[in-house]
Image: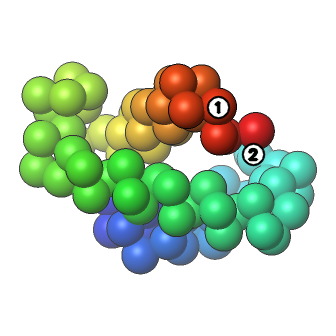
Amino acid sequence: MRERIEDKSIFDYLAKEMKGDIDLTVFPPEAQTEISRRLADAAGGVHDRERRKFGVENRGLCYLIALAAELIQSGQREGSLT
């Protein structure tokens, strides 16, 4: 999962792997690009410290959720994730 986040292919990966279980069409392409970029930035900030930062180890989807929660929190502080 980390690799998909860092290379910004997370939406394509999720669409392929979770076909029928998730609807990503609620995110227009521009939003997917921006979210992918922000996730990659956030992942870079915790690289090799995921377990200590989030309590996540070898759990890709949990890692993605933890990063998304981090983005939401930082967006609320900065007022920029709307």
Which numbered mark, 1 or 2, is in the foreground of this view?
1
Q: Is residue 21 left or right of residue 7?
A: right
Expressed as whole percent of the image width and height from the top left, the position of residue 49 reads: 12, 41
Question: Residue at (48%, 31%) from the top-left corner?
Answer: 74
Distance from the alpha carbon under mark 1 to that under mark 2: 31 Å
Q: Is residue 53 left or right of residue 73?
A: left
For residue 79, the mark is: 1
Q: Quadrant of residue 14?
A: bottom right
Considering only order in the chain, which callout, 2 or 1, is on the residue closer to the N terminus?
Answer: 2
Question: Residue at (76%, 39%) from the top-left corner?
Answer: 82
Q: Which of 48 and 34 is in front in this view?
A: 34
Q: Cβ–Cβ below 8 Å for labels 1 and 2?
A: no
The colour mode here is rainbow
Q: Quadrant of residue 19?
A: bottom right
Question: Residue at (76%, 60%) from the top-left corner?
Answer: 31
Q: Which amino acid does label 1 sit on?
A: Gly
Instruction: Single out the residue that lies furthest toward the front.
Output: 78
For residue 53, the mark is: none
Q: Is residue 47 left or right of residue 65?
A: left
Q: Specify whether residue 51 is in view.
A: yes
Residue 73, above or below 21: above
SS under mark 1: loop
Expressed as whole percent of the image width and height from the top left, the position of residue 8 reads: 50, 71
Q: Specify whether residue 16 is in view.
A: no
Q: Which amino acid does label 2 sit on?
A: Asp
Q: Which of 22 and 9 is in front in this view?
A: 9
Q: Which of 7 and 34 is in front in this view?
A: 34
Residue that label 2 marks: 21
- Crowding near the residue tagged with mark 2, few <14, some 14–19, many ≥20 C-alpha atoms within 10 Å: few
SS under mark 2: loop
Expressed as whole percent of the image width and height from the top left, the position of residue 54 reads: 26, 27
